[in-house]
Amino acid sequence: MTIETSLGSLRHTPPCVWEDKPSDCQDLVWRYSANPILGRRAIPCAQAIYNSAVVPFRGRYVGVFRADHMDGLPGLHLGWSNDGIRWDIANDTLPLETSEPELTKPAYGYDPRICLVDGRYYITWCCEYHGPTIGIAWTEDFQCFHRLENAFLPHNRNGVLFPRKIGGNFAMLSRPSDKGHTPFGDIYYSESPDMCFWGRHRFVMASGSLWWEGVKIGSGAVPIETPEGWLLLYHGVRSSCNGLVYSMGAALLDLEKPWKVRCRLTGPLLMPERDYEVYGSVPNVVFPCAALHDEAAGRLAIYYGAADTHVAIAFAHRDELVASLLRSPVA
Ligand code: BMA
């Protein structure tokens, strides 16, 4: 099987990242046959590259990658690709500009997401400020990155913006957490008029009711707008006798009140199964951070971290996912 590389009809549309579903696959989501696309020593400073975000930009793809450095600390790195598969990643960390001394301390950064809102690309990630919380920076050209105030008090992870304002405000999903590996966690929603002050906090959905996501849940890719609601791909975590297991699930949120869950799949879309998901720095992790959306064809290319070691891709038909969600129980 090959990845389609035909140029889109628009000059600025990069080649579509896609592979047809294998004829013997009955799942809603299927893996790219050449997974993983990135691994341990993709750049000299990194011991693992995973949990990373990509978007189309001016005829190519650009990504912000999580690289775990040789000293064990994770950092954010910029990468470019013509096809979304082969990446050229900078060995230096992302340069973030700020005049605020409280934000300039050297620190770690991990699990980035990228979201285009009103012509600006916002990067959200898990940053260090007396514990993990949600850092934000914006760029228009992927050369200058302007750091904004952290969105929340520590401790918080998985800050994922909506790609348009809701009721006139920026909107973000996140998961309040703890300093460590967090044995709990539900998804919340917050709004901001200016990307500085965040409030109007709302509860969205909880872990716990289903076995495969019984420990905690966290938003994954930027929500995808469909006529039926926001399609949210998220990670759900369960506990096993041998540690935590991260899988991918899906929910559909109300378009204008996204804290209201319309429906939620009862089972996971993707569970750790392949060697690159089961073996690595942290075994048994599937962690979605981005989804490319070919709106006309209804195709999704989901980028996920595998076993805290690799970047991998999975595919889905948007309308099949939504139809399956609509047949699922109201959450
Ligand atoms: C979470 C984060 C993720 C990681 C996951 C599994 O708490 O650190 O980056 O993928 O744990 O180790």
Image (spheres, grey):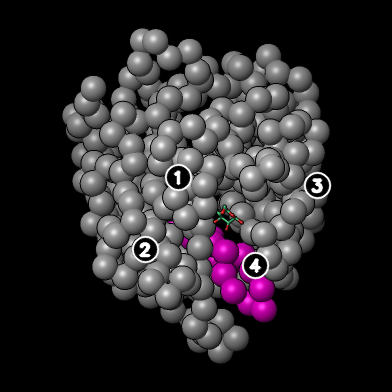
Please rate how many residues cluster around mark 2, counting C-alpha atoms within 10 Å: few if below 14, some from 14 to 19, many from 20. many
Q: Are marks 3 and 1 in contact (CB under 8 Å)?
A: no
- For disc 4, the neighbor class at 10 Å (few under 14, some 14 to 19, many from 20) is many
Identify the residue shown where x is 53% and y is 85%.
105
Q: Which of marks 1 and 4 precedes in the sequence?
A: 4
Q: Quadrant of residue 45?
A: bottom left
Q: Residue at position x 52%, y 52% from top?
A: 282
Q: Mark 2 and mark 4: span between their CA atoms?
A: 24 Å
Which residue type does callout 3 highlight?
A: Phe
Sequence-first tag of 2 and 4: 2
For marks 1 and 2, give the CA distance. 15 Å
Marked residue nearer the N-terminal end (3 or 2): 2
Q: Is residue 289 visible from the viewing direction of this image?
A: no
Residue to which mark 2 is pinned: 47
Q: Circle 1 is placed at which residue position?
A: 279
Give the mark nearest the N terminus, 3 or 4.
Answer: 4
Spatial CA distance of label 4 from label 1 is 28 Å
Magenta stretch in the rendered image: 117-137
Q: Quadrant of residue 276?
A: top left
Q: CA distance from mark 3 to mark 4?
A: 18 Å
- Relative placement, left or right, of 20 versus 254 is left
Front disc: 3 or 1 = 1
Q: Secondary structure at mark 1?
A: loop
Q: Residue at 34% across / 41% down in the picture?
A: 36
Which residue is label 4 attached to?
133
Would residue 38 appear left or right of 133 to someone viewing this image?
A: left
